[in-house]
Image (cartoon, grey):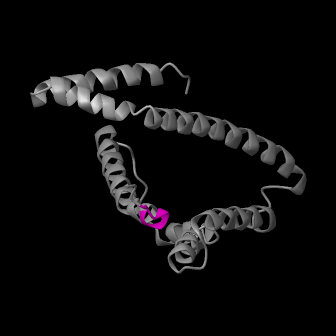
Amino acid sequence: MVAQINIDHLFLAGILPGLLMLFLLSLYSFWKGLQARVTRPRFSAREVWRAFRETIWELPLPFVVLGGIYGGYVAVSEAAVLTVLYVLIVEMAVYRDIRFRDLTPIIIKSSVLVGGILIILGVSFGLTNTLITEEIPTKILDFMRSRVESPWVFLLWLNLFLLAAGCLLECFPR
């Protein structure tokens, strides 16, 4: 039986690892800055206030999205549309960085990118369904159970598999 996974719970589960990565990256950057002896400007409350004012239109976005999802007002997919609409209004009406005539090339480039991602997802879903239909994971598990008795041998097989998978995945350009 397949367990039902709530996408909201998966979304919420990413917050703590994201904050941990943010903290570790900040710590690493601070450490590397000390090693490189980068000159640091003095703290200025005026500079902090100016930076805060510049981000005044970006700050509500996470609260709107997360509040909408966990408040039960919007689904995750609707929150994505809400985000696009919010950013489009801010960029076109407030900052005026995007003109109306610039929307067509932006939409075309975005559509090509999304199309490429959907092709990759379609092929991966097809491969996953084929593997499940042919019961390949079960056959591999049965093979491993019948022939591998030592945890070290299992780790060796696992590393060989990951090496082969990595070689296949690295052949595509980034």
Asked where in the image residue 73 lies, by quadrant, the reply is bottom right
Magenta region includes residue 38: no
Q: Which residues are magenta?
A: 4-9
Q: Is residue 88 above or below residue 169?
A: below
Q: Position of residue 68 (x, y in %)?
A: 57, 76
Along the line of sight, which residue is nearer the eye, 28 or 171? 171
Q: Position of residue 55 (x, y in %)?
A: 60, 67
Along the line of sight, which residue is nearer the eye, 158 or 90? 158
Q: Position of residue 75 (x, y in %)?
A: 59, 70
Residue at the image position 30 percent from the left and 28 percent from the top = 140
Residue at the image position 33 percent from the left and 26 percent from the top = 162
Residue sitting at the far left:
150
Residue at the image position 37 percent from the left and 55 percent from the top = 1
Q: Is residue 149 above or below residue 113?
A: above
Q: Is residue 89 above or below residue 158?
A: below
Q: Position of residue 135 (x, y in %)?
A: 39, 34
Along the line of sight, which residue is nearer the eye, 120 or 171? 120
Asked where in the image residue 157 lies, by quadrant, the reply is top left
Horizontal side, residue 70 vs residue 26: left or right: right
Along the line of sight, which residue is nearer the eye, 16 or 124? 124
Q: Quadrant of the C terminus?
A: top right
Residue at the image position 50 percent from the left and 76 percent from the top = 70
